[in-house]
Structure formats: structure tokens, C-alpha cells
Image (cartoon, rainbow, N blue to C red):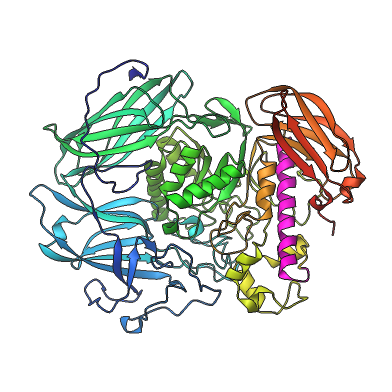
């Protein structure tokens, strides 16, 4: 192992040519040497799952769609304006039946989509190759050139390439993308017929089945599918060997030094092994540093090969979440050289140096220091072609605005833009592999899942924000609520994936399945009430809790028409008004709303929205603050469920699809303050005594701080208190405050440091209590 110091002056000759046009963003941004030919734009398309090869038929009558796009959006960036809860159209079984869809309704289709485009081609020089690059294609894909199959792929989150050279002719060429995203089968005879039991065979997580899909877990839960070319498609000319990925894995991280394992994945398109060398340098991406040289060399055998090097960095600039430190990022520039020393490809990637671990008690450590995760669950959108840089930057800013230092990307992988934003803004990511509920246990599927898990590590490992790989959400072997379950279904699969990813990436925590070790508990929602919460058996690390809430009236008017916006007046659940079926398609849960949470509809939709949002806000605040007061004494971190709605719907999210915050967003923002003056109360029992705590998640102690409180009609009280770093302390018992709990006044609480600077604030009124039923 070689050792280098960033503080030492080293001469290092420029080894890279000028970086040319960006082809795709890599795991942390990538620049390719060869100029790409962008194939985005209008493609002819045909939704057709019947027999026959549509790559050779006349496509002049086919409609056009702008790619990249999920085909439901039909090339648009926004949700279809006229989409409703109507049943899907019958499948198209012949080209004669094709009618050009109206983009304002969306293309609701599960099956095979044929995309066709004619391109011109001038043959490359001998020894050169013309490569097609595709970025995130959902889900099965064949590339067909002039009627001949050139390559295929399975998966939705990968970037992959196909050699077109043997299939291209001088002049005009027909390129066909045959993309299949078929619906999964399910057994309606079982309890939870769609969510369980089943044997899925597509690694799509929440994009196949989930509580927040259109139709949720009903028989209609797979409508408005996610198939398509999501992120990019282009061609580039290759000299024969390309850099496919570069990943940098930090281990043994401390302030003094860190070990780096640098690994390059290279693709040799020829039939002969070629000796190659990668000259690289790393330097600060958002801070100044000395350049550090790195050399990787070896033989590039036909197909995929890996070159690696290990080194030590002294006094590394570490990456931290926003509330614990700076978001230091490095950039590695790499030039691939052939045997003659000629540069034949170049790339760059951004990464960070940080260490992450947790102990047997689920206490977490970032760069060797104890941390407390304040998080939520996240699905950006059901159609990732929407989730560009602006989309991701906005959502991460909303997370920061809610005082979240972490987010769980729930049972799927996002586009790279999201992780870039999380890196830059300092939000840690619990990352789920796209497995959700039950899957087949046939050996072929296990093998495919392991391949795709390795793809995940290759593509996403350079993002320092990702602190956890979790291999399965609510696996069937682990969930008690799944009746008629096979107690061993997917157990071997999850163990295999955990072992594989742990070996491939020792720089992160690898967790087998969410719901085992971490906790999914829903007091006041799936559990009928909140008495005595936190429950005695509540896991110390929660990754799901929450309640559903309606979005604003304005958003509901976009979801429902005038007929369905207000189902039959006076109706409660169960009812016969068919308007409720439309609400259920939008993921509304009537049993939980009316029978479990006892939310009142009121006299109009405005009252229903108020009551629903108030319940969600009160429950979110109560559970969050209760757990945070138990910091390191019953709670080591928590992820609320859910942050944003991923389509125009009614879910647990505190921000709706149009990014309008619900009342629960402010409740989350307040209860997740890094320095929280917390009011302990019994949410169902307003006559019980109140007490004051201070929860401090920072590494700074505040001696002689002032905890102050008053009612809005009374005088302020001031108690001097030494607030320790990274702790929760009980400060004052207030007793019963009848004026507050009966609605005559509001209790205001705030914390100031010794100089009078406000560190956090809180309040309590009668409106924050939940009425017993």
C-alpha cells in the first residue's frame, strides 16, 4: 500500500486532455473523452405485446414520443392534466388498433413498447467501435439494429452499453428499442392479495407494488406503470476500451487518515486482451487541496475487467451531514491509456471520505462520532424521468427545511441527481435495494438479484451521503402481519444479498431487511390507538411511523372532479357511494381514517382537510418528540413515513405531489429541530401533568443556557440549565396546566444560550391533543 499526504507539495503533470461534452452523470458526475451523438428526441412508438417482430414493419403511422421519458408521461415533464381514476384502456393487440393517445390523459400501458428511430451512420475507422449507451431503462430491453438483435438488459437503474458496430450499415439505419414492463401476477384468493403473498420476478421495488402506487395494493395497483427510457440514450465512438465506472471506497476513516480502495470497471469491446493503464489524480472538489496521483494498470480482457489500487490519505477532509460538519467532496480525474501511452478515454467522478457504523444496540457513528438520525422516507415520483437536478435540489432543500439530517430512499433507487444533491446539502441516505414484499425463490432470480445488487454498488457507491445498503423492505420471512406466509420465503435470498454487498462495499453498513432490527410501527394508524406510546417493545431504531392526511383543497381539486371531490354527504365507511372507489384509487384508506383514527369528515371538504391534516400533524409531533426524549435510552434514531407524495394522491406524506406542505410538515420541522425544547404530555389525556426537556443533537454543550416558558397571557419563567452535548435531559416539571389543555391559552417554550441567542422553540395548545374515542 502506498502512502501519500495531501499536505506535501508534489509535482504532477497534467495527464488529461480537455474534458469534452458530458455524456451522462456517473455515480457522482462523469465526463467522457469521446463526443457523444445524442439520440434523445422524438422516437416512433407502438404499445404492442402481441406476436411478431415490430422492428421490421413500416412505422410511418406510429405516433412519436420524446425520449427519454417514462411512457406514461409520453415525453412530458408534468403529470397528465386529465388523468383520473378511470379503468385502463384495453390492451393494444395489433397495429391496426393503435390510436394516438392524448398526452393530457397519459399512456396507461403495461406490456411491451416498441421505439423506432432512423439514424445516419458513417463507418468508423478500423479498430474503432460505435457504442450505444442507455441510462435507466425500465425494465426488460432489447436493442435491435436493422432487424438484428444487438444486445439486451434487465433492470431499471443501471447505465449500460451495446456495441452496434457489427450491425450498422453505411447510410440509413433503423434502431429499435423493445422495452417490456409487464404487470406482475397475483393471487386474489389470499389475504393482502396484491401486497402478499406473491412471487414477483422484477427488481423494481415500489415501482411494481406499494402502498403509494396508483390503486395502492388493490387489484388495480399496477396501473400507470413506470416503463420507459428514463434518463438518457446516446452513441459514442470508442477506441476499443472504455471506462465504465470508477468507484472510491473509504475505510478505516479518522481525522488522521483514511484508506481508499480505487476500482475502475473497464469494458473491452474487442476480442483480444489489451494492456491498459489509468493515470488519475484526486483533489478537492469544493475545497482547495494538493493533487494526489493514482495509477491503476492491468489487462483489459474482452468484456468487463477491473483495475484497482489502494492508498492512504493523511488528514482527509471528511464529509459530514449538515448538522454535524462540512460536506467536503473530492474529485478524481482519470485518463485511460493504451499500450502506446495514448489517452483513449477519460472520465471524472466525485466522492467523499467518511466512515459509518452502528453497534449492536443500533447506536450510530459517523466518522467515529455518535449521531442521531432524524429522517423520513422518500419516493421522489413514480416516473423518474421527471426527477432531474432541479427536482432533486428542491426536494433535498425541503428535507433540510424540515430539519432532517437523513432520508430513507424507500425500496427503490433514485436517479443520480438526488444523491448529488444529498452529498452537496449534507443529508445522509439509508438506501434500500429495490425489493419490496415477496419474490420468487427460484435460483435464476437469486442470481439476477445478486447481479443487480453488484450493479447498485458499482453505480452508487461514490456518494458519501449513502450510509446504509438495505437489501429488502418488509421481506415475507420477517413480517408477522403477512398471514399464510412461508416463514422461509426470501430468507436465503436476503442472506445472499447481504453477504455479497458486504463483501463488495465494506465502507457502509449493510442491513439484511427493513423491519428486522429496525422497526415499522404505526400507533394511531394501523394500531387503533396511542395509549402508553412508546410501546414497551418498540425497537430503538424506527424506520417507519406516521399517518395519512389529505392534501389541500386546491390539490384535491386536481385529483378529483366535482362529482367525486365530496362523496355523498353524511356517508361514513363502509358506504356504497362509488366516489369512495375513486378516493381509494388515490390511496385513501377509509378504514384507518374513520374506524382507527376516527377523523371526522365535517360538513365540507375544507373541514375534512383541516381535521385530517391536524390529526397527522399531532401524531407526527407526538411520536417524534416522544422518541427523541428517549435519546440513547430507548431510541437511537427515527425515520418518519412518508415525506412527499410520489403522484397526485392521498398518503402519509407531509408534502403533496405538487410540493405544497401539509400541516404535518411544520410538525415534522418543529419536532426534528437539532436543539429541541420538548414538551412532554399525554396526547390522549390533557388533564395529565406537563414537563419540559431539552434534546441536543449537536456536539456543542451550552453551559448556563436559559430555558424559558410562558403562556401567551402570562409572565415568562426562566431556568438556567447546563445543556450537555449530544444528550436529552429533563429540566422542569410544570404540573397540570388547565388553561393550556382546555384551550384558554398556549404554552410557549424556548431555549437561549448564555448570550441570549435563541437555539430552539416549541409550543403546546389544546389543538395538539387527540380526542379519545
Quarter of the image holding residue 616?
A: bottom right
Q: Is residue 429 left or right of residue 579?
A: left
Please count the marks in the image.
0
Which residue is located at x 42 percent, y 51 percent?
449
Q: Is residue 238 left or right of residue 512?
A: left
Rendered location of residue 374, percent (x, y): 62, 40
Q: Is residue 762 at all visible to an observer of this figure?
A: yes
What residue occupies the far bottom of the structure in this picture?
A: 96
Q: Is residue 734 left or right of residue 374?
A: right
Q: Nearer the viewer, residue 364 or 649?
A: 649
Quadrant, the N terminus: top left
Quarter of the image holding residue 456?
A: top left
Rendered location of residue 117, percent (x, y): 24, 67
Quadrant, the C terminus: bottom right
Q: Is residue 217 left or right of residue 74?
A: right
Which residue is located at x 60 percent, y 76 percent?
561
Which residue range is magenta in the image?
Answer: 602-630
Q: Is residue 611 magenta?
A: yes
Q: Nearer the viewer, residue 426 or 597?
A: 426
- In the rendered view, tell whether residue 325 sits above or below residue 587: above
Q: Nearer the viewer, residue 647 or 741?
A: 741
Rendered location of residue 21, percent (x, y): 26, 46
Q: Is residue 466 at all visible to an observer of this figure?
A: no
- In the rendered view, tell whether residue 213 sits above or below residue 306: below
What residue occupies the far top of the structure in this picture?
A: 8
Quarter of the image holding residue 221?
A: bottom right
Q: Nearer the viewer, residue 623 or 670?
A: 670
Q: Is residue 114 magenta?
A: no
Question: Mostly what secondary structure, the magenta segment?
Answer: helix
Amino acid at each position: 500500500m502506498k502512502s501519500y499526504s495531501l499536505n506535501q507539495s508534489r509535482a504532477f503533470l497534467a495527464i488529461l486532455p480537455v474534458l469534452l461534452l458530458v455524456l451522462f452523470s456517473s455515480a457522482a458526475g462523469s465526463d467522457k473523452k469521446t463526443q457523444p451523438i445524442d439520440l434523445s428526441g422524438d422516437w416512433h412508438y407502438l404499445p404492442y405485446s402481441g406476436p411478431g417482430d415490430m422492428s421490421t414493419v413500416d412505422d410511418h403511422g406510429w405516433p412519436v414520443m420524446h425520449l427519454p421519458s417514462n411512457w406514461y408521461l409520453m415525453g412530458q415533464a408534468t403529470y397528465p392534466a386529465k388523468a383520473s381514476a378511470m379503468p385502463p384502456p384495453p390492451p393494444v393487440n395489433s397495429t391496426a388498433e393503435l390510436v394516438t393517445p392524448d398526452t393530457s390523459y397519459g399512456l396507461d400501458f403495461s406490456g411491451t413498447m416498441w421505439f423506432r428511430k432512423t439514424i445516419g451512420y458513417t463507418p468508423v475507422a478500423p479498430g474503432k467501435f460505435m457504442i450505444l449507451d442507455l441510462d435507466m431503462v425500465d425494465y426488460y430491453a432489447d436493442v435491435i439494429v436493422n432487424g438484428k438483435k444487438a444486445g439486451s438488459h434487465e433492470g431499471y437503474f443501471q447505465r449500460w452499453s451495446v456495441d452496434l458496430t457489427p450491425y450498422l450499415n453505411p447510410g440509413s439505419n433503423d434502431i429499435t428499442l423493445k422495452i417490456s414492463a409487464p404487470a406482475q401476477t397475483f393471487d386474489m384468493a389470499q389475504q393482502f392479495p396484491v401486497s402478499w403473498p406473491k412471487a414477483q420476478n422484477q427488481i423494481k421495488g415500489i415501482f411494481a407494488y406499494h402502498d403509494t402506487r396508483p390503486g395502492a395494493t388493490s387489484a388495480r395497483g399496477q396501473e400507470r406503470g413506470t416503463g420507459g427510457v428514463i434518463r438518457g440514450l446516446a452513441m459514442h465512438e470508442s477506441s476499443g476500451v472504455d471506462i465504465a465506472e470508477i468507484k472510491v471506497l473509504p475505510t478505516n476513516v479518522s481525522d488522521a487518515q483514511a484508506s481508499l480502495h480505487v476500482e475502475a470497471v473497464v469494458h473491452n469491446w474487442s476480442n483480444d486482451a489489451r494492456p491498459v493503464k489509468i493515470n488519475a489524480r484526486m483533489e478537492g472538489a469544493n475545497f482547495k487541496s494538493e493533487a494526489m496521483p493514482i495509477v491503476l494498470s492491468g489487462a483489459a480482457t474482452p468484456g468487463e475487467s477491473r483495475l484497482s489500487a489502494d492508498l492512504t490519505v493523511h488528514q482527509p477532509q471528511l464529509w459530514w451531514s449538515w448538522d454535524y460538519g462540512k460536506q467536503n467532496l473530492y474529485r478524481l480525474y482519470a485518463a485511460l491509456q493504451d499500450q502506446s501511452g495514448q489517452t483513449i478515454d477519460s472520465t471524472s467522478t466525485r466522492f467523499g471520505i467518511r466512515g459509518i457504523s452502528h453497534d449492536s444496540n443500533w447506536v450510530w457513528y459517523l466518522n467515529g462520532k455518535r449521531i442521531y438520525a432524524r429522517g423520513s422516507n422518500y419516493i421522489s415520483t413514480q416516473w423518474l424521468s421527471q426527477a432531474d437536478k432541479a427536482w432533486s435540489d428542491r426536494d433535498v432543500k425541503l428535507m433540510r427545511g424540515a430539519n432532517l439530517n437523513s432520508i430513507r430512499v424507500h425500496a427503490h433507487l433514485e436517479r443520480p441527481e438526488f444523491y448529488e444533491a444529498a452529498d452537496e446539502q449534507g443529508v445522509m441516505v439509508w438506501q434500500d435495494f429495490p425489493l419490496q414484499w415477496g419474490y420468487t425463490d427460484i435460483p435464476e432470480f437469486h442470481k439476477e438479484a445478486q447481479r443487480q445488487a453488484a450493479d447498485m454498488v458499482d453505480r452508487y457507491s461514490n456518494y458519501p451521503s449513502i450510509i446504509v445498503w438495505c437489501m429488502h423492505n418488509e421481506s415475507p420471512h420477517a413480517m408477522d402481519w403477512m398471514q399464510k406466509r412461508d416463514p422461509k420465503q426470501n430468507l436465503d435470498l436476503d442472506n445472499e444479498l447481504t453477504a455479497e454487498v458486504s463483501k463488495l462495499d465494506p465502507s457502509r453498513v449493510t442491513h439484511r431487511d427493513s423491519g428486522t432490527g429496525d422497526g415499522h410501527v404505526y400507533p394511531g394508524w394501523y394500531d387503533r390507538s396511542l395509549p402508553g406510546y412508546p410501546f414497551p417493545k418498540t425497537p430503538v431504531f424506527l424506520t417507519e411511523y406516521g399517518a395519512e392526511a389529505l392534501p389541500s383543497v386546491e390539490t384535491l381539486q386536481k385529483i378529483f372532479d366535482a362529482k367525486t371531490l365530496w362523496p355523498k354527504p353524511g356517508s361514513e365507511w363502509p358506504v356504497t357511494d362509488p366516489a369512495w372507489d375513486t378516493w381509494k384509487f388515490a390511496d385513501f384508506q377509509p378504514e384507518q381514517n374513520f374506524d382507527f383514527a376516527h377523523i371526522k369528515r365535517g360538513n365540507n371538504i375544507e373541514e375534512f382537510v383541516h381535521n385530517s391534516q391536524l390529526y397527522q400533524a399531532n401524531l407526527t409531533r407526538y411520536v417524534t418528540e416522544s422518541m427523541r426524549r428517549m435519546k440513547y435510552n430507548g431510541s437511537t434514531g427515527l425515520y418518519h413515513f412518508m415525506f412527499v407524495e410520489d403522484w397526485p394522491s392521498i398518503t402519509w406524506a407531509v408534502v403533496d405531489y405538487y410540493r405544497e406542505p401539509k400541516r404535518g410538515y411544520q410538525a415534522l420541522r418543529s419536532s426534528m429541530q437539532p436543539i429541541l425544547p420538548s414538551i412532554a404530555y399525554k396526547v390522549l389525556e390533557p388533564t395529565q401533568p406537563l414537563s419540559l426537556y431539552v434534546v441536543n443533537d449537536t456536539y456543542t454543550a451550552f453551559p448556563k443556557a436559559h430555558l424559558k416558558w410562558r403562556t401567551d397571557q402570562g409572565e415568562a419563567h426562566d431556568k438556567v440549565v447546563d445543556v450537555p452535548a449530544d444528550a436529552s435531559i429533563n429540566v422542569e416539571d410544570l404540573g397540570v396546566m388547565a388553561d393550556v389543555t382546555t384551550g384558554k391559552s398556549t404554552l410557549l417554550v424556548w431555549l437561549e444560550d448564555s448570550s441570549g441567542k435563541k437555539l430552539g422553540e416549541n409550543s403546546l395548545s389544546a389543538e395538539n391533543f387527540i380526542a379519545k374515542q
